[in-house]
Amino acid sequence: MNVWLMHGNSTLMSQFLRRVELTGVTMWKHSLDFSSCPTLEDLNLCSSRIYGPKISSQSVRCLSITQCQFNVDTGSRMRISAPCLVYLQLADVSGTAPLLERMPLLVTAFIRLGRGGFGTCTHEAYGDCDECFPYDGYYYGHDDYGASFANYHGSNDSVLLQGLSGATSLGLTTIDPNVFTFRKDLKQCPTFSMLKTLLLNEWCVAADFGALVKFLQCTPILEKLIIQLRLEKLPRVNSMIETYESYNPAVQLVLKHLKDVEIKCHKEDEVVRQIVKILSTFGVLSDQIDIQVIQQTYVSGSFDQFRAD
């Protein structure tokens, strides 16, 4: 059943509801507010168009948003407010990336950004240039029904990573390696002081390996690193703007806890060799790195994989 939610706020009221699943919902200029469901723990949104200012719940512990599209051509960025969240999944989502508010209890998060949005750049280098994302700063206001909203216009503040910084297990992947939301967030990268397991795919090596280096610098107790590479999406090494050697070695750390590295690829090429070389500068030995040559096409991780850890 398709559902349209138009303007204003939608407040679902129940003292007993524990799980909500919405499929085929279109939310237009509409906040989805679950504050009147104090026992709600599990919220699932699937195959929906969510063009509104906010999704909020003070009780939800597991939030899964899959195959959904966020604010497209609305000039605003949705906020997700769920301070009790423990598990988060944003998989195969597109549009304008939502702003994640603080999640102090977060343990596991899996993010897979889809095609058709989330900021792509036609230029080489990082893809966070002003020409491709020209606006700057927040604009706070109210819609016609009094619901507050915040427009985000490309400032250097973190959109996703700050809210994810307390996680223990984290997957950050994209279907299109040119999506630069993660790389843009890395300009103000927080320290992932609790992170032990990290999954990345080819976006982290695009242009100059800078994203990979930055993550290694910001994950001091990381124990397991998984990098998945799809050969057809990888950049040519000779087209990279700069290499990891351009980063200040003084801020590179020896990752004493990182003992298990998996690199899944279609073949061992120069990109893989550069990754191994970078890891060695952080004290990772070659016998700690497992290079797995995989012939078939695969999906970059899954939420259940992390929840099982």
Image: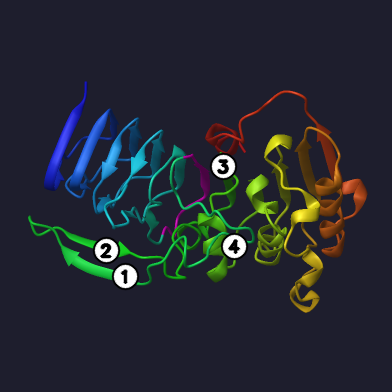
Residue 22: x, y in percent? 27, 31
Assign a secondary structure to mark 3. Answer: loop
**Labelled pair 1, 2 in contact (Cβ < 8 Å):** yes
**Which label number is shown at residue 176?**
3
The kind of secondary structure element at disc 1 is strand
Pick the front one: 10 or 230: 230
Q: Is residue 240 visible?
A: yes
- Alpha-carbon neighbours of circle 4 within 10 Å: few (<14), some, or many (≥20)? many
* Residue behind mark 4: 192
Mark 1, other Cα within 10 Å: few <14 / some 14–19 / many ≥20: some
> Which residue is disc 1 drawn over?
138
State the separation of the CA atoms marked 3 and 4.
Answer: 24 Å
Q: Position of residue 171 (x, y in %)?
A: 58, 45
**Label 1 with label 4: CB-CB less than 8 Å:** no
- Name which of mark 1 and mark 2 comes first in the sequence: 1
Task: State which region is magenta.
Answer: 103-115
Residue 165, position as x, y percentages in the image:
53, 60
Point 87% across, 49% down: residue: 273
* Location of the N terminus (image quadrant): top left
Binning the other alpha carbons within 10 Å of mark 3 as few (below 14), some (14 to 19) or many (20 upward) gives: some
- Amino acid residing under circle 4: Phe
Q: Amino acid at mark 1?
A: Tyr
Give the vertical position of 21 relative to 165 (above or below): above
Q: Earlier in the sequence, mark 2 or mark 4?
A: 2
Looking at the image, can residue 13 be seen?
Answer: no
Instruction: Give the amino acid at mark 3.
Output: Asp
Left or right: residue 64 compared with residue 76: right
Disc 1 or disc 3, which is closer to the eye? 3
How far apart marks 1 and 3 lie (CA) works out to 27 Å
Q: Is residue 113 magenta?
A: yes
Amino acid type of the residue that numbered disc 2 sits on in the rendered structure: Ala
Drawn side of residue 26 relative to residue 188, left or right: left
